[in-house]
Image: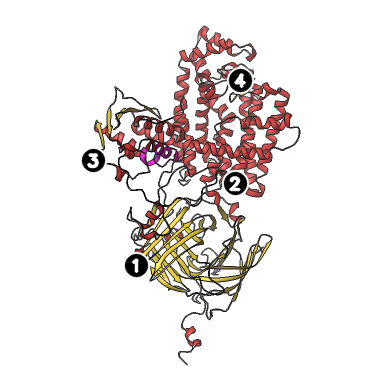
Amino acid sequence: MPGTSSDLIRLGPLDPFPSALPTHPLERRWLHYAFLSRDGSLGMVANLSWLGPDPTAPTEATRRMHILLLHQRGLGWRASQFNAQADEQPWSAFRLPNAFAAPQPFTLRAASDSPFVRYQMLRTSRPCTSQAAPFAGNQHLRWQSEPGVIARGDWGFDDQLIEQVESVGYHERVRGLWGWPEMGGWVFGFANDPTAHGDDPPPTALVFTLIQPPHPADATTGSVMLWRHGRMRRHFPRRCVEVAVRGLLDRDKITQVPELARLFGVAPMAPIPQRLVISARSGDDWVLLDFECETAARIVIPNETGIAPYSVHEVIGPCKIEGRCGSDSFAFSFYGIVEFAGGARAD
Amino acid sequence: MPIEHMSDLLVQTIDALARRTPAIVAAAAHQLGVVVITLHFGDQSHATLRAQHSRLLAVAQPAADATVECYFDERAMNLLFDLQRRPVDQVWERSLDVRGERDQVLAVWRTFQLLAQRAAGLRAVQDLWRTYRAANPERWGKLPSVAQPATTTIPALQQTRHTGWSALDYLDQRTPVQQESSALPTIGATVQIQDRLIWDGQNSDPWWNLADVIDADLMETLLACKRRVRQEIEHMIPDREPRARLYDLIRDYPAREGKGLRPTLTIATCCALGGRAEDSIRSAAAIELFHNGFLVHDDISDESTHRRGLQTLHEAHGIGLAVNTGDAMNLLAIDAVLANLPTLGLARTLGLIHDVVHMCRETLEGQAIELGWIRDQIVPELDEDYFEMSTKKTGWYTCISPCRMGAICAGETDPLRLDRFNEVFRLIGIAFQIQDDVLNLIGEEALYGKEPLGDLLEGKRTIMLIHLFRTVDGAAREHLYEIIKRPRSAKTQANAEEVLAAMKQYGSIEYAIQLADRLAHAGVARFEIDLADIPENEAKAVLRQIANYVTTRPL
């Protein structure tokens, strides 16, 4: 009977992505996870990606590349190779049905079993509406984010087992078709106010995006999205947003992962900024994020299309957020995770 | 030294740039060419700026032969260097007046523009100007309103707007949360990079886009790298007996004041290719230990008495202990290379071992060639013979291998790509060695560190000696030959003075200076071609500064 919950969930694909397999070599599907423990001492970034078939390979199989990175303050980064093992159907907030207040398992481990995470995932917030960035003719990137995800469970870091860690983070699904030089680069990031109790959503959460394709000239897409108590309250579109950077992060604070990349002469990447400030204003509402890059992992992405190896920086650092939304003022200081990608050269 | 007048400020700024950023000075001197500028400042002081080869010479007095005259008001010097104030807030109509021939005025303009763009951000220059401004606030007129530190009572975006861009205003009013650790070698962070908007709501400036030219402060970098590598060597020396007869002696040479070129080349190359400075420290320490081990042995075979201003090791402790100490340094150096295994992995460590072996072989061959010349009482005829010997004896371990090993530390193990450093730093290395030899003859002892005319007493086959014997003939040649073939113990200071006088008479020193200049310029040109595919970053700028150091070094 129309209108029942079982009918509603059939309106779209049950999985985070369409069921049709990717066919183009540049077609990409990602599930992205980033978490910080409530005390900010542990950080986790994971990317589960499925790529279109390799044009030089005899079969048209989807390529799977999963990587897990863990960061412990004072001890640095540990990462799997690109063959991390995930669940058959990895948890995603975008997999239906997915009830609130019902924890679901999520496991990701390196092939060597270290590092690994073993979580129970819990949604507390609603996702933003899906965003899209078209560029370079037929290329595009679509994504949808959800902050305030709670991950409870164990972290395996070297020989240590850190049990029953509670962390709050961010989940995102991305799909599209793009080449790295055409896509240019991006600055993605989030911050959650960690002071919520129990299963409550963060009082404030912020997700920001800046995608900077070189062509066409007006292709840059940016936005700042603000959640209050689990619901997205403001979406500041690109014309309302300003992004400024200062200084350069010391190269010695950047760890190159995965370990295998150390065997190769990997082309240097542009140094990432030391500090990132994003401001957004719309009417009387405004928000400002001040992020200090503290440590970064440079993920070297293998050559896919003949370009030099490309890399993405996952950066953890303290951040301050303040702003106003409607009649509420808010401010908090915690750690955030920012992703800097860009500077691929088509040579 | 207090800076009273703007002319002093200019002179000190140029002096600081000559020591810290040879590449900027060389580029500015190239733009200035034959133009002589006299600058008249608002405080009634005057200065003259001119170029000589790749050097900029500034004096705090007007010149009679000036071809361009520049008049500044009190504050217009901001146009040149000061990043602390935005020029648009400082310059009034008629703040700056330049008079001269059109092409020469344009040359001056290009020089000033280059200095303003590339030197203004240097921390040392900024410090100099900050000091001057603090001491002479009245000359700066009314300062633009200084932003107050943000307080919690004023929300970030409700503060006074200065630039029109709230994110930039916010950054302007804040100092870094985190200070850089001074224990790390400083490759980078010697230049103040202005805050910039990468998105202003309409226009995008990719975050990975940096200014085309990033210049580094060579002096600060050399110092930081030298200190860090010395610290590493200190950690490597065992803390056990026999201290007085071995381990304390190992500390002796590395602790003496050197320029720190080798450690800096290694670390900077590693960083330029995307590696971490810390990954290259042990290799830099290994090269320093090899170098010092070679020096100890070299001083024995050359019968040198002084090294870096102090007694040589064998003079102070006897030949036996000195030979043993040199051996121990070489052993420690091998240990330092092998210690890279856990951090850099097998492939890079093997690459390093391969390069170290090659470097040692080249050095020993070069030493054999030179000692053979002296033993057989030969003065080679051609400069090329000297080039070959010099490259083998000092070029490899002073310039070429440090770069190659730094590149290996960053993961570059392709032999063809490593070879890109060879020709550039071969030319630079020869020029550097010739300049060192010239300094031994005409430099002050404190500056050079060896005993005066030590090379002549040792009978070292320098380019000056080769030129002299190529030029002089007849009885004078016989007489000079008779002097130089004597063993060192049979030579007197007067003999050395006599050879020096002949070198001056026959233009051998001037010839060597010119030759070094030509080689250095060829090296700098090759640098831009051969290393073009290394992306511009501050570490590459350090390498560029070192390449240019040879062209602007005061002789």
Chain where mark 3 sits: B
**Callouts 1 and 2 in the same chain:** no
Residue B61 in view (yes/no): yes
Q: Position of residue B186 (x, y in %)?
A: 52, 42
State how far apart marks 2 and 4 are (Cα). 40 Å
Amino acid at the residue labelled 3: Glu
Find the distance from the CA under tag 3 to the CA under tag 2.
53 Å
Q: Does the residue at mark 1 contact the one at mark 3 (Cβ under 8 Å)?
A: no
Q: Are both tags, 1 and 3, on one chain?
A: no
| Above/below status of B484 relative to A113 | above
Residue B279 is marked as: 2
Closer mark to the observer between disc 1 and disc 3: 1
**Residue in the foreground of this view, choosing between A287 and A215:** A287
Q: Position of residue B536 (x, y in %)?
A: 45, 45
Give the residue type that dot 1 points to.
Asp
Please provide the residue range marked out in magenta: B115-130
